[in-house]
Image: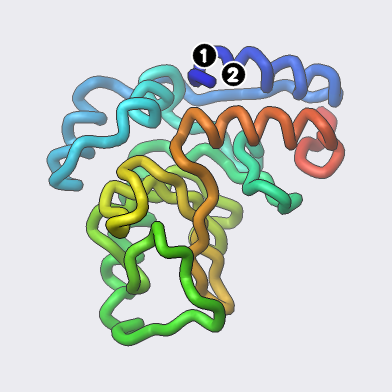
Amino acid sequence: MDFVRFIEVMQGVYADAGATLELNAPATEQQIAAAEHELGFAIDPALKAAWRIANGAPSWTPLFARPDFYTGFDFLPIEEALRQRRNMRERAPRYAGYDEEQPRDARLREGWFQDGWLPFAGFSAPVMMLISDASPAASGRSGQIIAFVHDPDQMTFVSQDFPNLLAVSATQIAAEPQEYIEED
């Protein structure tokens, strides 16, 4: 699913739930270029296309869902996504040698932080975040989506890519909007 279609679907879901989906103005090409310069890698094309349509959404506007969890994730503006990434990178040395309680999905590289990770959605970020992964393990693929959950800290595989996450999120939120959306 592309982001334009996703937003159309979500606007309908919000309307049916008695709410209005609000989005921020599009990110500028200068904001996107500056982000990629800071990151040192190209942002996944589907995620970049989303930011070109909306530079995130206001806080407490659930737009994404982690499969099989009743947690709605806000779409972070580029500046907030970069800030969350900087914070993770800064904290990462404290987690050297970190081992999760459960073995990590083989598609994800080990460690508490990877330079190719870019958070783009959050629930009370940084408590829970969805992350675009540009540095997957050998059995993963660039652009896959992972989830970070704090306490106990864990990284889990969520989706093969951003378009798949959109489709899953739309289906899941539409099925039980009362779990995600508050009426206006």
Placement of 65 over or under 129, stated as above or below: above
Q: Say whether residue 83 is visible.
A: no
Say which quarter of the image contains residue 149. Answer: bottom right
Q: Is residue 130 left or right of residue 36?
A: right
- Image quadrant occupied by the C terminus: top right
Q: CA distance from mark 2 to mark 1?
A: 5 Å
- Give the x, y percent position of residue 177: 82, 34
Q: Amino acid at mark 1?
A: Val
> Where is residue 129 shown, x and y percent of the image?
51, 54
Count of labels shown?
A: 2
Circle 1 SS class: helix
Residue under the image location 35 percent in, 82 percent down: 95
Question: Which residue shows up at 49% across the image and 28% down it?
Answer: 163
Which amino acid type is marked by label 2?
A: Ile
At 75% from the left edge and 50% from the top edge, which residue is drawn?
70
Front-lying residue, 19 or 173: 173
Q: Is residue 150 visible?
A: yes
Disc on res. 7 = 2
Could you tell me residue 99's position as x and y percent? 43, 84
Q: Quadrant of residue 65?
A: top right
- On screen, 20 above or below 155? above
Q: Which residue in the protein does label 1 denote?
A: 4
Q: Residues within 10 Å of mark 1 (few under 14, many from 20)?
A: few
Q: Secondary structure at mark 2?
A: helix
Relative height, residue 88 to residue 8 (above, below): below
| Rendered residue at 67%/45% (across/down) | 72
Marks 2 and 1 close (CB-CB < 8 Å): yes
Classify residue 46 as left or right of residue 96: right
